[in-house]
Amino acid sequence: MKNYIFDGHKLMYHPGRVNEYLEKGDSFPMYMEISPMGKCCHRCIFCAYDFIGYPDRKLETGRLLKFIEEAAGCGVRSVLFAGEGEPLLHPDIEHFIRHSWENGIDAGVFSNGQLLKRELSEKILPFLTFIRFSFNGGTRDNYSLIHGVKPAVFDRVVKNIETAANLKHRKKLGVDIGAQYVLLPENIKFLPGAVRTLKDAGIDYLAIKPFVQQSMRQSYRMNGKMPATEINRALNASEGLSDDKFRVIARREAFGKYGERKYARCFGTSFISALNSAGDIASCLPYWDREDFVFGNIYRNSFREIWCGKKRKAIKKHIENNLDAACCPPNCRPHAVNEFLWEIKKPSVRHLNFI
C-alpha cells in the first residue's frame, strides 16, 4: 500500500535544505503552486477564490517556460499546476508539464477533470508525479449543485477519470491518480456514492478533507458545524471501502484539529510559494492578491531577482517577526512545515543534547 501524507510534511527527507535555512535564515522554495489560468469552467460553491471574479487571464507561454527553467536553477523541486482557475484550460498546459519534467522538477496537477480527454491524458500523464481531481458530489444532481455545472458534466468527468486510469494501467505509468472530496453539509450524505464511483473508475486514492475558510471575502459559509458523530460515521464508512488497489484517506487530523496551531509565527514561506495567473509571486495562497504580500512579478524580473530582492526580504521579515499566525486561515498549506520549524527553532523539549 502506498503511503500518502496529506496532513504532515516531508521536510525531514530534505535535511540539507532545512540546514541551509537554519544556518542562513532563508532558502529557495522547494515547492511552488502555479496558476496558469485565472478563469474556471466550474463554479464550486465553496471556491476559495470566487471573490477574485474568475479573471480571463493566463500566464504567457514563453515566460512560464523560462520561469520553470529559472525555478529549476534555484533548486525548486516540485510544482503544482492548480491555483485560482482550472489549469487544463491553458492551451499549453502539456508543454508546462513536460518542461518541468525535463528540468528535473516533479509536476502535479489539481483539476476538475472536465477537460481531460484521452488525447490530453496521453500527452501529460507520462510526465506527471500525480494528478488529483476535485470531485465533490456523489450523484449527478449533487455534483451539479456543488460544482455549479450541468448534471451531464458529472458523466463526462467520470469518463475522463476512467480513461486516465485505464491509460495509466495499460502503459504502466508511475503517475498517481487521486481525487479530493471537500466534506460539506450539502454533500456529506452523498459521500458513499462518490467513493464507489471513484473506486470503480480505477483511481489510486480519494482524500476527504474539511472545508477551509481561506478568506472572509469568499462567498460560501457553512451553516453551523457538522456533528462530529456524523462526520466520523461518514469517514468510517468510506474508509471501509479501501482495498489493496484503492485507498480512502480520511484527513482526520485536519477535521479534529481544525485551526489549531502550536506556533506563533510563519517560517514556511522560505519553502513554499505561489505564482498566480497575473505573474505575481506571493508568500502563500491566501495572500496572493494582496500587494503587501506579493514579492514581485515575473514579467518584470527573474525568479532569482524576485526571491533575493529587497521587497521579499522585507515581507519575509514581517511574516516571521510580526505577523500573528493565528490571523491566518486555518489548515494552511505551510501548517505542518511551520510546526516542524517552530519546534526546531524554539524547542519545547528540555536537555536537547541528551539525544
Image: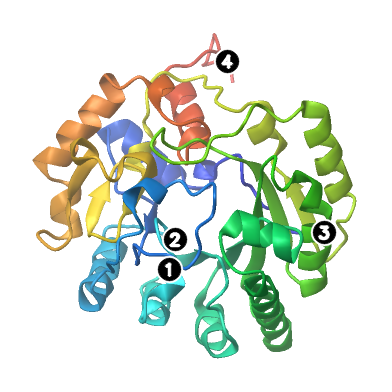
Q: CA distance from mark 4 to mark 3?
A: 52 Å
Q: CA distance from mark 3 to mark 1?
A: 27 Å
Q: Is residue 7 above or below residue 300?
A: above
- Horizontal and vertical percent position of residue 182: 64, 47
Pointers 2 and 3 in contact (CB under 8 A)?
no
Lower position in the chain sequence, tag 4 or tag 2: 2
Residue lying farthest to the top in this orientation: 350
Q: Secondary structure at mark 4?
A: loop
* Left or right of 14 on screen, residue 192: right
- The residue that label 2 is drawn on is 82
Mark toward the viewer: 3 or 1: 3
Mark linked to residue 115: none
Q: Residues within 10 Å of mark 2 (few under 14, many from 20)?
A: many
Q: Secondary structure at mark 3?
A: helix
Mark linked to residue 193: 3
Q: CA distance from mark 1 to mark 4?
A: 50 Å
Mark linked to residue 87: 1
Mark linked to residue 354: 4
Lower position in the chain sequence, tag 3 or tag 1: 1
Q: CA distance from mark 2 to mark 3?
A: 26 Å
Q: Label 2 sits on what residue type?
A: Ala
